Image (cartoon, rainbow, N blue to C red):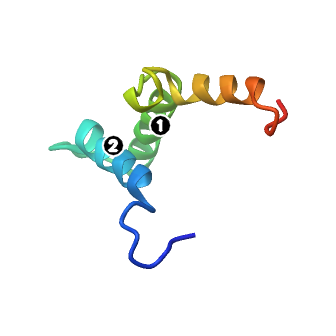
Amino acid sequence: MSRRGNCYDNAHAESFWSRLKAELLDGGSFSELEEAKLEISHHIAYYNAECCHSAIGYRSPNYFETQLQTTSQFCPA
């Protein structure tokens, strides 16, 4: 839930959408809506499964989440 006056509440989501626009949509266009949906879903899958992120030790988000769930006593796997 967003807190009034906290500029960091949506920082991760804003970063994702900024990267999506820069990497996938910058200067391009799609001929139809279905093509756009397909490309965006492929990009999201790549971003979560393969793309390494420096904030989580150069691991993919999926790998990081799996490791967190298997090592945390608070998140049952």
Which sits in the foreground, 40 or 66? Answer: 66
- Provide residue 55's location: percent of width, then percent of height: 41, 32
Judging from the image, what secondary structure is the residue with disc 2 in? helix
- Provide residue 77's location: percent of width, then percent of height: 82, 30
Residue 20, numbered circle: 2
Give, as a three-letter code, the residue at label 2.
Answer: Leu
- Given contact means CB atoms under 8 Å apart, are the residues at marks 2 and 1 in contact? yes
Q: CA distance from mark 2 to mark 1?
A: 8 Å
The answer to which image quadrant residue 62 occupies is top right
Judging from the image, what secondary structure is the residue with disc 1 in? helix
Q: Residue at x 54, y 30 (%)?
A: 61
In the displayed structure, does residue 59 sit left or right of residue 5?
Answer: right
Q: Which residue is mark 1?
A: 44
Q: Residue at x 43, y 60 (%)?
A: 10
Q: Residue at x 74, y 30 (%)?
A: 69
Give, as a three-letter code, the residue at label 1.
Answer: Ile
